[in-house]
Image (tube, rainbow, N blue to C red):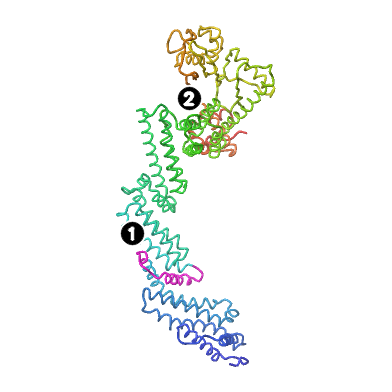
């Protein structure tokens, strides 16, 4: 071909036709040598010159039209006949083969016609798209329905356990995807929609038969296996965008439709799985239902009810044991608390391991324990029982059989259980009361464990809960240092002699639980000790004034009797009363009262413990069980006891009522502060919304009663901290 002369259409197109015919023979697998570089260059050059020649020899439009005709002719003569008469898997294989050949043909022809594609086409479709569109219009539309049915049939075969050619399905579905020309419209409309509908129908049939014959665990195993296989199916041949849709259809039919029946199945329902500790099955149930927005709520409700039932049974058993006095006094309460802790640990492990610490199950656990613990046990609230349990662990003597690790583990379990106790402030006050006694009476097993417990509480529930208790421990540490300085002071000042061994603990007001001040007139021996310490303390600071709290003190007193000498550990008031009998062996109630200047309530308790209790150091006339102002008290020289050292406690007082009153009073202040804080930030707020926000803000410490909040709102209105809106009385406004 002479390229220096204008190429005529018949001559040029004839040469190009020969190249196209050779390409077809190669694609059909006929014996044909591949294109040599010279042949390829000659075809490209021929088309190039046919495009750049000046009219009337510019054949660009004719080339474009004949390009389409050549591809359409190839489809009619080769592709469609090869597909005709084939069905199912054979048809799919042929479709994949012809689509692959067609893409090769379009690619080669696009190379031949590259110049035309690059420079001539302005508004027309690119040649590559023309070739693919021809296949879409003449082949894809013709066979996509049959191909879809064949693919879905093969998927069903695989679901039933049969073996299929996954690579073939992958290639067929690529035909659906690639015919969308960069979009997934063809795949979604012509295949995916039908496949999803068939999936729903398939699993609906399976689920309806399984639910009748399988137990809950067996059904869940089958459902989980099906969902795993659907995921594998997507990874092997379906498009990735189908995964979520496919799983949703399968999950809906397998799980959501039959959730109620599955959870309540006879002999294998959810509550039975909890009762039988079927951890693996419960974990599977969580995994299956967590995909649904509200799928876990019915399981959470069953979990909550099951725990509440077990807890209620535990309370009833403990009450029955207490009535029968199966344990020694007080021990049944400790046993009950330990069983509650074990129950909480058991189901906390379920929440963490089976239910992946899901908030639904955390809430269910908390509400279940609140339900069966809200009434307490044996007249005590759970807050008080937990505080007593901790006291039993941390007090000397009680914990001698426990290692340090066991003590810390037990305390950690209490802290975790406390999360399910609504009245945490009440626990804190009872715990502070017990801590107060351990620290002042030197009953704590060691300060290290005390600090560990406070650290755990602080980390879990905030510094507001533990600030006072931390101050108490710090006070005791400072008191030991202060005592050392006092002893150094006594050693360095020989002229100062208290006459008795004296240990003083200086307390910071406000940190320690409420204690009672009294104007006790100390006997001279004790008064001299107090005066010596006062002078020492003034050398350290002149900005603080000491006020002696006799109600918290204790004394070691040595008594000489006819048979032997006995040492007593007494309350300060008891010791002061006994020391009066050094000067007189017989004293009336009024004489003792006058000399000690002690309130009747405290004096009666002190004299009762010395004359009416187990150890009668004083003889009371008349010999009755109660103390009255007309009684006479006589020193008992014939008193004796088996032990040489005796501790005589005062008659116990009901501290529970005082603690509850203190907490109620403190709650009023806390509610006031919360109301003011909310209104200060919001300026104006509706009454009901204020109550809701107040409850939400305080619920981490206690559950405030709505009536109590309304009373505090009225109180703040009276005190002009807040006011009602003049136009809308339901709105409350903060007053700066």
Cα gap from disc 1 to disc 2, whole angstroms: 64 Å
Towards the viewer: 535 or 366: 535
The picture quadrant where one finds residue 161 is bottom left
Asked if marks 1 and 2 touch (Cβ < 8 Å), the reply is no
The secondary element bearing badge 1 is classed as: helix
* The image quarter in which residue 253 lies: bottom left
- Kindly give the residue lying farthest to the left in the view shown: 213
Seen from the viewer's position, the closer of residues 370 and 519 is 519
Q: Secondary structure at mark 2?
A: helix
**Residue bearing mark 1:** 206
Q: Is residue 161 left or right of residue 364?
A: left
Asked if residue 179 lies in the magenta stretch, the reply is yes
Spot occupied by residue 686 in the image (x, y as percentages of width and height): 53, 38
Compared with 431, 362 (above or below) is: below
Quadrant in the rendering for residue 366: top left
Crowd tier of the residue under label 1, counting other residues whose Cα lies within 10 Å: few below 14, some 14–19, many 20 or above: some
- What's the magenta region? 156-183
Q: Which residue is mark 2?
A: 657
Can the viewer see residue 714? no
> In the image, is residue 71 above or below residue 630?
below
């Amino acid at each position: 071909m002479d390229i220096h002369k204008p190429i005529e259409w018949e001559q040029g197109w004839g040469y190009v036709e020969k190249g196209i015919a050779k390409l077809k023979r190669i694609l059909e697998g006929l014996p044909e040598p591949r294109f040599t570089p010279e042949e390829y260059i000659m075809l490209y050059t021929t088309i190039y010159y046919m495009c750049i020649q000046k009219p009337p020899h510019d054949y660009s439009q004719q080339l474009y039209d004949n390009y389409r005709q050549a591809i359409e002719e190839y489809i009619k003569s080769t592709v469609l006949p090869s597909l005709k008469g084939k069905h199912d898997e054979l048809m799919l294989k042929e479709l994949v083969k012809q689509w692959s050949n067609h893409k090769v043909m379009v690619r080669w022809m696009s190379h031949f016609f590259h110049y035309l594609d690059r420079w001539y086409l302005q508004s027309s479709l690119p040649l590559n798209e023309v070739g693919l569109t021809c296949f879409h219009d003449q082949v894809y539309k013709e066979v996509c329905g049959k191909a879809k049915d064949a693919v879905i049939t093969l998927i069903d075969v695989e679901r039933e356990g049969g073996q299929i050619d996954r690579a073939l399905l992958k290639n067929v579905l690529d035909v659906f995807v690639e015919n969308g020309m960069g979009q997934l419209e063809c795949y979604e409309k012509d295949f995916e929609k039908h496949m999803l509908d068939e999936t729903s129908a398939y699993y609906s049939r399976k689920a309806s038969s399984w639910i009748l014959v399988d137990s809950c665990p067996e059904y869940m195993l089958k459902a989980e296996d099906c969902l795993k296989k659907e995921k594998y199916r997507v990874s092997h041949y379906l498009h990735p965008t189908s995964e979520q849709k496919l799983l949703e259809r399968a999950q809906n039919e397998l799980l959501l439709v039959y959730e109620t029946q599955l959870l309540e199945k006879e002999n294998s329902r959810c509550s039975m799985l909890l009762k039988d500790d079927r951890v693996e099955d419960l974990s599977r149930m969580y995994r299956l239902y967590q995909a649904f927005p509200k799928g876990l709520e019915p399981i959470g409700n069953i979990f909550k009810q099951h725990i509440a039932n077990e807890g209620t049974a535990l309370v009833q058993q403990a009450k029955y044991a207490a009535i029968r006095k199966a344990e020694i006094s007080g021990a049944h309460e400790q046993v009950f608390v330990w069983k509650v802790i074990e129950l909480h640990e058991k189901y906390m492990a379920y929440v963490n391991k089976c239910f992946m610490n899901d908030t639904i199950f955390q809430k269910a656990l908390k509400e279940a324990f609140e339900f069966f613990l809200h009434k307490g046990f044996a007249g005590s609230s759970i807050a008080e029982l937990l505080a007593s349990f901790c006291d039993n662990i941390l007090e000397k003597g009680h914990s001698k059989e426990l290692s340090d690790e066991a003590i810390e583990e037990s305390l950690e379990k209490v802290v975790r259980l406390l999360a399910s106790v609504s009245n945490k402030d009440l626990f804190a006050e009872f715990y502070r009361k017990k801590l107060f006694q351990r620290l002042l009476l030197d009953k704590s097993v060691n300060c290290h464990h005390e600090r560990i417990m406070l650290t755990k509480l602080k980390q879990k529930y905030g510094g507001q809960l533990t600030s006072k208790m931390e101050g108490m421990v710090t006070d005791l540490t400072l008191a030991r240092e202060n005592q050392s300085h006092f002893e150094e002071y006594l050693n360095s000042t020989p002229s100062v002699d208290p006459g008795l061994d004296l240990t003083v603990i200086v307390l910071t007001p406000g940190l320690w639980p409420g204690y009672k001040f009294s104007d006790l007139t100390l006997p001279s021996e004790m008064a001299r000790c107090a005066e010596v310490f006062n002078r020492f303390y003034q050398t350290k600071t002149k900005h603080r004034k000491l006020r002696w709290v006799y109600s918290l003190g204790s004394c070691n007193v040595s008594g000489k009797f006819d048979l032997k000498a006995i040492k007593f550990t007494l309350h300060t008031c008891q010791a002061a009363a006994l020391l009066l009998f050094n000067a007189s062996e017989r004293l009336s109630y009024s004489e003792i009262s006058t000399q000690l200047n002690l309130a009747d309530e405290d004096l009666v308790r002190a004299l009762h413990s010395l004359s009416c209790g187990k150890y009668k150091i004083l003889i009371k006339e008349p010999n009755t069980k109660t103390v009255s102002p007309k009684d006479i008290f006589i020193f008992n020289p014939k008193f004796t006891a088996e032990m040489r050292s005796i501790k005589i406690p005062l008659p116990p007082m009901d501290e529970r009522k005082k603690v509850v009153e203190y907490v109620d009073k403190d709650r009023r202040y806390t509610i006031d502060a919360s109301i003011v804080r909310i209104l200060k930030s919001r300026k104006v707020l509706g009454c009901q919304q204020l109550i809701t926000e107040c409850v939400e803000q305080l619920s981490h410490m206690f559950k405030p009663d709505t009536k109590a909040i309304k009373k505090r709102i009225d109180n703040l209105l009276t005190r002009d901290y807040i006011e009602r809106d003049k136009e809308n009385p339901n709105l409350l406004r903060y007053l700066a």
